[in-house]
Image: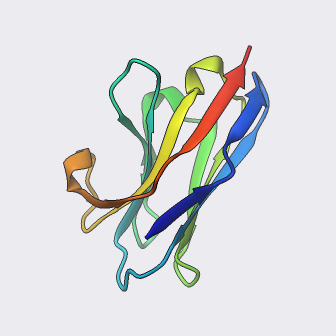
Amino acid sequence: QLVESGGGFGQAGGSLNLSCAVTGVFTINTMAWHRQAPGKQRELVARIDYGGRADYVEAVKGRFTISRDNAKKSMDLQMNSLKPEDTGVYYCAIASQYERDDRAYHTWGQGTQVTVAS
């Protein structure tokens, strides 16, 4: 089970931090944050593997930072310099390999809403 927390309202230029806690999963390879903006397809925002290798969608590079604590089986997304286009439902997900395709992610959280006001 994956449980997200930390969503809510933010101001443009401000910051929010999202967290994801994992239970009931023995081995976690890749953890990722996806988001779905209103009227748009869900997209991969950032992913991180067990060793800490990470990458980001171009739109958030330099503003968002993904991190994980393997011992605690948790993951964070620090979102700085927020923009209104960051608004959406953010989902935590895990995969067995370091994949971009969201079909590779086999377990998902319920999502947490992030709304950024201009």
Scheme of image coloration: rainbow
x, y percent for residue 10: 76, 31
Q: Residue furthest front?
A: 110
Residue 21 drawn above or below residue 41: below
Residue 64 drawn above or below residue 68: above
Q: Which residue is drawn at 44% across and 57% down?
A: 109
Residue 70 drawn above or below residue 43: below
x, y percent for residue 18: 64, 51
Residue nearest the observer in this picture, 38 or 98: 38
Residue nearest the observer in this picture, 31 or 21: 21
Quarter assignment of residue 118: top right
Residue nearest the observer in this picture, 91 or 14: 91
- How many numbered tags mark residues here? 0
x, y percent for residue 82: 69, 28
x, y percent for residue 65: 60, 48
Q: Residue at x 27, y 46 (%)?
A: 100
Quarter assignment of residue 16: top right
Q: Residue at x 58, y 81 (%)?
A: 72
Q: Would residue 69 appear left or right of 91 to someone viewing this image?
A: right
Q: Residue at x 43, y 70 (%)?
A: 1
Residue 3 drawn above or below residue 100: below
Q: Would residue 5 appear left or right of 20 to someone viewing this image?
A: right
